[in-house]
Structure formats: structure tokens, C-alpha cells
Image: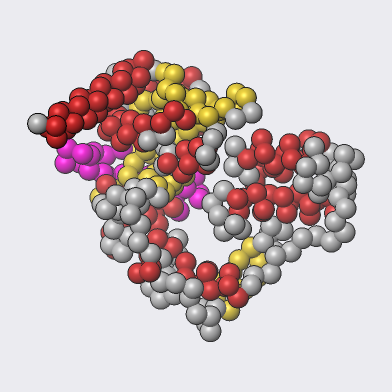
Amino acid sequence: MMFHEIYGSYYQTVARVLRAAVDHPLAPNELKEIITGHAFGESEWNIESALREERWQLIRKDGTTPIRKKPTCPLTLLEKRWLKAILMDPRIQLFMDAGCDAIPDFIKIADAGESIEVLDLSEVEPLFSPEDIRVFDRYEDGDPYENPVYQRNFRTVLSACRTHSSIVVDSMNRKGRIRTETVVPEYLEYSEKDDKFRLVGTGSRYGGMINLARIISCKVCEEDGMWKEDGGKNPKNSKEDGKKKLSGEGWKETTERKGSGSRMVEFELIDQRNALERALLHFAHFEKEAERIERNRYRIRVRYDKDDETELVIRVLSFGPMIRVTAPEVFVDLIRKRLIRQKHCFLKNLTEKNV
């Protein structure tokens, strides 16, 4: 579970809390700051309440901890074998330096306390190989991770995300047309179901998300942070302006602007049968906000591009009664029409079988 996308964050966050509590009693605001700074946004509800109410019995009401030593986590042989296997994944190669084609024998890792450790994996056998895994519930048109052009574009985008630099992107849309746009990168998202990476950013008139595989070329802007809607430079605008356009009222203005492909859907989710966790994975590559309404009910807003609307409808329907779309009415109508078509297809097939 330590390597799990969600639960691994739980462990690392709680470890940070305990490290601080061993040094000194934690003030209420300090506990919240640690959790907010290192956990997923949705994790705040679970971690903070579990610690404050002493359900996990790790932090006392006065902010101290019964643990005397700071928690450490030396890797077992099984975990080292898992790391060696993961390094064989072509997606991991994207995050390595250019020209590093071979699987490294030595890697650096950082624990919850930010200390660096060098691991020797030269004599460690991988736990599995990429050929051992078969994913059935996944689209087959995944990104070309071993393509040199894709790798170069990926590393350029990744570097821009880390340095908060603006980039000029030439990409191909679904109609086969090349478009050029200036983007302020926010982060990269990976969709396990689609097997694709997507760039989430601001400043583009085409929306806030770009499929990495559609990028033909990209380069860092010489004058960072200056953009305008037509892709040119504008000294009156900055990266902060770009961020505003896709958050809060700025998002509303962007989605309502004529010709914009950016849209938003809002739905309520009942957290039964791990529905919340499944939703976070299913909608991982979409920009989203989550708000807890009641104990097991959440309000989730998902921002998406117009081209992804049909896919989003299908994914929402896959949750059945666990999700109820509340807005906008246009999206509700799409759900209604698709259910009617499915009903007609079912009745038609049933009639043909009985004839």
C-alpha cells in the first residue's frame, strides 16, 4: 500500500506529522498545514479527523505523540525488486535524463524527512517485467512512450512545469489541423484507463488540457510568462492572469467565451463500493474540485474539453446510481438522450431474439 497512488500519500503525510510531533508538540494550525501541504486535497478530511479524534492513536490532544523516535522506512528486498521492475516501464524512462536508455543500477530516493539515500539495485532481480502485465479495461491507442519525438516533447513540458516557464506548443487537433498556442504549464496528468499523459495549463484560447501525443513540437518561450489569447506576447498579462482564467470566476469567463472548448460538469457522488476512489482514478486526467457535503456524499466538479464530452458521458454513466449529475442542464440532457438510445437498442435486440 505504500506505493499506492492514494494510500502511499497517507503514509508519507502521517510520517511527516509524526516527525514534527517527536520534535515538539504540534499546534492545531501546524497539523493542518502539514496535511494540506503534502496530502491529496481529498485526504485532508480523512487524515486530520483521524488524528484529532485519536482514532489512529498517534497524536494526543495536546499535540504530542506516544512515539519516541522519528519513523523511518528502510526498503525490503521485495520493495527493491518492485522498484527495479518499475524502472523497466517505458513511462518511467520519460522522467529520466535524455540519453539514459539503460535501467540504472543506482538510484536516489528521498524519505518523508527529505533525506537522500542511494540504493544499489545492480544485483536485484526485478519482481516482474512489463510483458507480464495485461490490462483488459484500457483503450489500446496509448501514447508512444518510446518515440524519440514524444520523449523530447515530454521532457520539455516536464521541465517547463518544474520551472514554471511558458511554452509554445504546435499540436494537431482531432480534425488533423495544426494549431499553435502559448501555454503556462501547471502539471502533467496520467490516465490509467486511456494510457495517456495530458498537459494541464492556462493561457490558451483552446482550453486548459493538451494530449501529449498530439504535440508535434514545443519549446520554452524566450520571455517567460507573457501571453495573450491569440498566442502572442502581451506585457500586460502574466502567468497569474493565466491561472485566474481557469479558476473561480476566471474559469467561468473562459468557458462562456465564444469559441472556447472548455466546459464543466458538476455531480454528486455517494461513496459506496469505493466510488470516491474509483472516481479519482477514472477522472484523473481531468482538472477537478471535490467538496464533501455529508459523511459519504461529495460534490465534484470536472473541467473538460468539448472534444472529450462523449468520453466523459460514458465514464459518468459507468458509476450508475453512485453519481447524479446536477449541472449543467445540457450535460444532463446528454445523459438522458444516451440512456434513451441504450434502452431502444436493448428493446430492439430483445425483439429480434424473440422473432
Check residue 162 for magenta coloring: yes
Q: Is residue 174 above or below residue 79?
A: above
The quadrant of the picture occupied by the C terminus is top left
Residue 133 in the image: state x and y as whole percent. 38, 64
Please tell me which residue is depicted at 48% across the width and 41% down the height of the picture. Answer: 278
Residue 137 in the image: state x and y as whole percent. 34, 50
Check residue 30 for magenta coloring: no
Q: Is residue 86 visible?
A: yes
Segment tinted magenta in the rendering:
159-181
Please tell me which residue is depicted at 63% across the width and 40% down the height of the picture. Answer: 43
Q: Is residue 185 visible?
A: no
Please count the marks in the image. Answer: 0
Kindly give the residue lying farthest to the top in the view shown. Answer: 329
Please tell me which residue is depicted at 81% across the width and 41% down the height of the picture. Answer: 54
Please give left or right for residue 65 compared with residue 291 in the image: right
Which colour scheme appears in the figure?
A: secondary structure
Residue 193 in the image: state x and y as whole percent. 37, 48
Residue 170 in the image: state x and y as whole percent. 27, 44
Kindly give the residue lying farthest to the right in the view shown. Answer: 62
The quadrant of the picture occupied by the N terminus is bottom right
Kindly give the residue lying farthest to the front in the view shown. Answer: 354
Q: Is residue 326 above or below residue 349?
A: above
- Most foreground residue, 295 or 93: 295
Please tell me which residue is depicted at 60% across the width and 50% down the height of the picture. Answer: 7
Q: Quadrant of residue 114?
A: bottom right
- Most foreground residue, 252 or 73: 73
Please give left or right for residue 273 compared with residue 208 in the image: right
Q: Is residue 6 above or below residue 75?
A: above
Kindly give the residue lying farthest to the left in the view shown. Answer: 355
